[in-house]
């Protein structure tokens, strides 16, 4: 279950919801900041966190006036301090400062750091029982059981922001959980939906990042191109909604208008539709349990193109099989899959390996390292580090096709 506890009062005593944005300078983060800014009487900002984009972070901080702005990369601390001089906003830097920002009392925390780097701050927010708006899917892939257990133990509330999971959240009736027969995750198919494997082998980072429907950060864009994004989303759905892998299907829908569906045992299929605009799922979480208005175009089904659906091609997109395999193996397997994928995607973006080498690195890492049990955060860290080492060595040694 996503909202895993009796919802606590979503705002402070003054009726204003205090908010923190982890990954505020990214694609999800900047859309979140834009929505917060549109409602100055509803939200008060506690902390903004980025990795190193000081210019964007300082500009956001000057507009939202948080208590603190944090860069994870300590090399950028002096620049941030200078950029905030005279504002009264504190500057901080380093991974511990990122966790400290997430620990500050805020009713609502947007988890929109990219990659497993977001795990510890997301855990910190969950451990103080916050409402966590959850975009950072890699966290659940690398430490799903641990994170969900902490959410339950500390009475936190996890609200999905990933568009498919937000769609399911909006049509999934938790009181009728046994009557849900299937989750149907839609996938655009990405920029290479109709490409041959030969053509994909020569794909450039620019081509892989040219998503047909969504404007997103580079990492998730490459994941969409390989369809590893949908593989990660299967694992994410499994944890968020407590559904086994056998009851989670993927359906390619090139228009990204139907964001996902829930099938019930009586044959009813409930879907959520909208234009492909992340401001909608972000607003669902920011306003929850109310609804808040967003700017942007509204869905016009008369003017829009046809809505098409097709089965995913497992031969051209093996990432789906790899993710399901990791989920079925359990233990450290999803952690290894995620870490190897992060290393390989970064190497592809830096043109050190080819596009199809991403799946080779992931498959070899999964096959070579043990799928040990994960009992605590240290076990997660060890599996993550081992996979990163293995995948990096494979890339560095040229043990991939390029
Ligand atoms: N973009 C989208 O539409 C969607 C994204 N998601 C998920 O949301 C997450 C964010 O995606 P997206 O916004 O596209 O990513 P971006 O790459 O656009 O942004 C990433 C953000 O995380 C920050 N960051 C990166 N590393 C660290 C770190 N070690 N510590 C602190 N901050 C860090 C970046 O800071 P800086 O700018 O300084 O580098 C930036 O603010 C991902 O997990 C993605 O899968 C899910 C659904 C849709
Ligand atoms: C916006 C969002 O949620 C992304 O995860 C999106 O779904 C990516 O598109 P794909 O369906 O191509 O992976
Ligand atoms: Mn998605």
Image (spheres, rainbow, N blue to C red):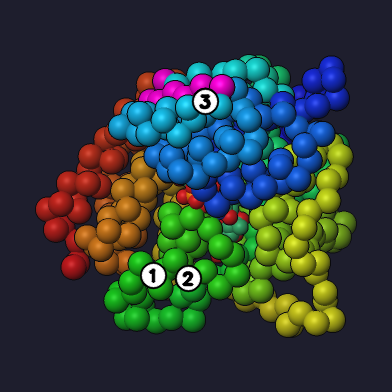
The answer to if 402 sits in the magenta stretch is no
Mark 1–mark 2 Cα distance, whole angstroms, equals 6 Å
Judging by the rendered image, the residue that carries numbered circle 3 is: 86
Look at the numbered discs 1 and 2 and tell me whether their residues touch, using CB distance below 8 Å.
Answer: yes
- Locate residue 353, reporting x and y percent: 24, 62
Q: Which mark is residue 210?
A: 2
Drawn side of residue 250 relative to residue 288, left or right: left
Where is 334 relative to 258, above or below? above
- Locate residue 324, reporting x and y percent: 49, 52
- Work out which residue is located at the far left of the displayed protein and give it: 397
Where is 312 relative to 195, above or below? above
The answer to if 93 sits in the magenta stretch is yes
Q: Nearer the viewer, mark 3 or mark 1?
A: 3
* Residue 372 in view here: no
Judging by the rendered image, the residue that carries numbered circle 1 is: 206
Mark 3–mark 1 Cα distance, whole angstroms, equals 40 Å
Point 75% across, 62% down: residue: 296
Considering the numbered disc 2 on the image, is that residue within a helix, a strand or a loop?
loop
Look at the numbered discs 3 and 1 and tell me whether their residues touch, using CB distance below 8 Å.
Answer: no
- Work out which residue is located at the far front of the displayed protein and give it: 86
| Circle 3 Cα neighbour tier, 10 Å, few/some/many (<14 / 14–19 / ≥20) | few
Quadrant hosting residue 387: top left
Point 38% across, 70% down: residue: 206
The segment highlighted magenta reads 88-96
Mark 2–mark 3 Cα distance, whole angstroms, equals 40 Å
Q: CB of residue at label 3: within 8 Å of ligand 1?
A: no
Q: CB of residue at label 2: within 8 Å of ligand 2?
A: no
Q: Considering only order in the chain, which callout, 3 or 2, is on the residue closer to the N terminus?
A: 3
| Circle 2 Cα neighbour tier, 10 Å, few/some/many (<14 / 14–19 / ≥20) | some
Depth check, front residue: 84 or 275: 84
Depth check, front residue: 189 or 247: 189
- Locate residue 64, reporting x and y percent: 65, 35
């Amino acid at each position: 279950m996503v909202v895993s506890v009796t919802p606590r009062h979503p705002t402070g005593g003054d009726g204003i919801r205090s908010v923190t944005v982890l990954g505020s300078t990214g694609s999800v983060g900047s859309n979140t900041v834009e929505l917060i800014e549109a409602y100055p009487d509803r939200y008060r900002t506690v902390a903004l966190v980025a990795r190193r984009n000081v210019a964007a972070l300082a500009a956001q901080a000057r507009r939202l006036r948080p208590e603190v702005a944090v860069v994870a990369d300590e090399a950028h601390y002096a620049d941030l301090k200078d950029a905030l001089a005279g504002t009264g906003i504190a500057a901080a830097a380093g991974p511990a400062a990122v966790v400290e920002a997430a620990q500050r009392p805020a009713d609502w925390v947007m988890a929109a750091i990219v990659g497993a780097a977001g795990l510890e701050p997301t855990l910190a927010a969950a451990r103080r029982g916050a409402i966590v708006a959850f975009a950072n899917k890699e966290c659940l892939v690398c430490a799903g059981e641990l994170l969900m257990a902490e959410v339950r133990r500390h009475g936190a509330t996890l609200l999905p922001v990933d568009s498919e999971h937000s769609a399911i959240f909006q049509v999934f009736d938790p009181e009728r959980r046994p009557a849900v027969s299937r989750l149907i995750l839609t996938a655009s198919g990405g920029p290479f939906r109709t490409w041959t494997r030969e053509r994909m082998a020569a794909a450039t980072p620019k081509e892989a990042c040219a998503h047909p429907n969504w404007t997103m950060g580079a990492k998730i864009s490459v994941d969409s191109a390989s369809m590893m994004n949908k593989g990660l989303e299967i694992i994410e759905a499994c944890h968020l909604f407590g559904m086994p892998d056998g009851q989670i299907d993927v359906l390619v829908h090139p228009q990204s208008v139907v964001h996902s569906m829930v099938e019930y045992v009586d044959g009813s299929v409930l879907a959520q539709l909208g234009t492909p605009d992340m401001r909608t799922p972000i607003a669902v979480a920011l306003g929850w349990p109310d609804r808040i208005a967003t700017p942007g175009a509204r869905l016009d089904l008369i003017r829009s193109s046809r809505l098409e659906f097709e089965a995913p091609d497992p031969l051209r997109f093996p990432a789906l099989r790899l993710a399901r395999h990791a989920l079925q193996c359990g233990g450290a397997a999803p952690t290894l899959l995620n870490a190897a994928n992060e290393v390989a995607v970064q190497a592809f973006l830096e043109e050190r390996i080819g596009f199809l080498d991403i799946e080779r690195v992931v498959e070899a890492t999964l096959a070579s390292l043990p799928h040990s049990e994960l009992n605590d955060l240290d076990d997660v860290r060890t599996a993550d580090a081992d996979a990163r080492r293995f995948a990096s060595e494979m890339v560095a040694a040229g043990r991939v096709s390029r």
